[in-house]
Amino acid sequence: MIDKPKKPQFFAIKVNVNKKLFKKFIMSETFLSHVTLLYKPSKDDIDMMSHSVGNQVTLKSKYVLLKPNVGATLVFEPINMYFEMSEPHLTISTNGQRPAVSNDIINEYNSGNETDIKCIPFEIEQKGIVCGAVYGKGGLTFVSDAKWLKTWAIIVGAFLPPSGAKRNLSI
């Protein structure tokens, strides 16, 4: 929960999945929370992505990639708002690693040099809402109303003098 607009740490599609569908892929850490679209956005990224916040998106899966004792991730068809380093995906589970290990698994699989990654066909349509992820009093919060995200326009506005005031631009 947040009490004022905050700068998003990343943008994501927040999903609600039936965890039972992924039971056979669960390791020590379970995630199944969101599809990261853009991590550590710049001011321009924030302005660009804020226009999509609150939109519903339908994702179509291709397969699950499973690297034993490392992690499992559900890989989706490409979407135009994904700006990360692999492919759109939902981290299912890891064996204690950070969820970002999913990017490594996908990239290793796509390189053709994978040795022990299993590709398991898995077709599902998953709906979700584009959100900005912010840290509030209760930890990570997914915000689907752009008014609660601190965009660059709001940040700049906070430093503008009141109407009619003279600006001193010298440093």
Image (tube, helix red, strand yellow):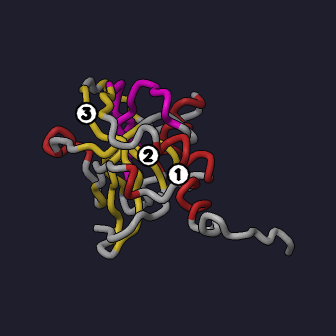
**Most distant residue in the right direction:** 170
The reply to whether the C-beta atoms of the residues labelled 2 and 1 are less than 8 Å apart is yes
The reply to whether the C-beta atoms of the residues labelled 1 and 3 are less than 8 Å apart is no
Which residue corresponds to the image point at 33% horizontal and 29% vertical from the top-left? 59
Query: Dot 3 corresponds to which residue?
Result: 127
For the residues labelled 2 and 1, the Cα–Cα distance comes to 7 Å
For the residues labelled 1 and 3, the Cα–Cα distance comes to 21 Å
Q: Which amino acid does the dot numbered 1 rest on? A: Tyr
**Range shown magenta:** 60-82
78 or 2: nearer the eye? Answer: 2
Which residue corresponds to the image point at 46% horizontal and 25% vertical from the top-left? 78
Which residue corresponds to the image point at 32% horizontal and 49% vertical from the top-left? 144
Query: Dot 1 corresponds to which residue?
Result: 39
Q: Is residue 74 magenta?
A: yes
| Residue 92 in the image, given as x and y percentages of width and height | 31, 46
Q: Which amino acid does the dot numbered 3 rest on? A: Lys
Q: Is residue 156 left or right of residue 73?
A: right
Q: Secondary structure at mark 3?
A: strand
Q: Which amino acid does the dot numbered 2 rest on? A: Thr
Task: Give above or below for 36 relative to 127.
Answer: below
Q: Secondary structure at mark 1?
A: strand
Quadrant of the rendered structure where residue 79 is?
top left
Mark linked to residue 36: 2
Quadrant of the rendered structure where residue 23 is?
top left
Label located before the other in sequence (1 or 3): 1
**Dot 2, crowdedness within 10 Å: few (<14), some or many (≥20)?**
many
Label located before the other in sequence (2 or 3): 2
For the residues labelled 2 and 3, the Cα–Cα distance comes to 14 Å
Mark linked to residue 129: none
Dominant secondary-structure state across the stretch colored magenta: strand
95 or 41: nearer the eye? Answer: 41
Q: Is residue 56 left or right of residue 111?
A: left
